[in-house]
Amino acid sequence: MRETDADNRRVAVYGLSRLLNDTRDVWALRMLLKTFRDENESRTVRDSAYSAILSVLGRPLSEWPSAARFLDHGKDIDWQRIEEAEAIVGRAPSDS
């Protein structure tokens, strides 16, 4: 993502998640995983990317962490879902 404003990136991530909900879209998962893992990205964007990953994977809202606070990566992240997304991306040919 090249947008310089974190709020715009966060909204873009949310929009992508709604548009591609339950599609398991490889391109979206690749981009969202990159954003989620980017330590130079703002926490709000990274947290939004995690929720978007869950959305693209088709996980129910009951599995999503609260958006009312920053995520604790030790407690709030379901690392099995991250591995699931990485496996989907890993099975697809790279376009980069």
Image: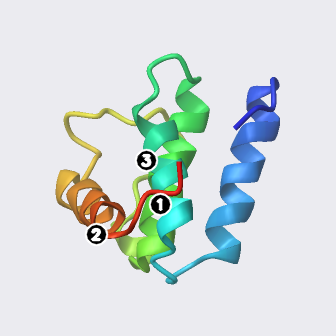
N-terminal label among 3 and 2: 3
11 vs 63, left or right, is right
Q: Which residue is drawn at 29% across and 57% down?
A: 86
Identity of the amino acid at label 3?
Leu
The label shown at residue 29 is: 1
Secondary structure under tag 1 reads helix
Q: What residue type is labelled 1?
A: Leu
Name the mark on residue 91. Answer: 2
| Mark number, residue 33 | 3
Q: Distance between the residues labelled 3 and 2?
A: 15 Å
Query: Residue 66, how many percent across, how many down?
Result: 46, 51
The residue carrying pointer 1 sits among few (fewer than 14), some (14 to 19) or many (20 or more) residues within 10 Å by Cα, namely: many
Question: What residue appears at the point 81 percent right and 32 percent down from the top-left corner?
Answer: 3
Q: In the rendered image of this protein, does residue 27 appear above or below residue 18?
A: above
Cα gap from disc 1 to disc 3, whole angstroms = 6 Å
Q: Is residue 76 left or right of residue 23?
A: left
What is the quadrant of residue 71 in the picture? Answer: top left
Please state the total of marks drawn on the protein image: 3
- The relative height of residue 23 versus residue 54 in the rendered view (above or below) is below
Colour approach in the figure: rainbow
**Which residue does the image show at 52% across and 38% down from the upper left?**
35
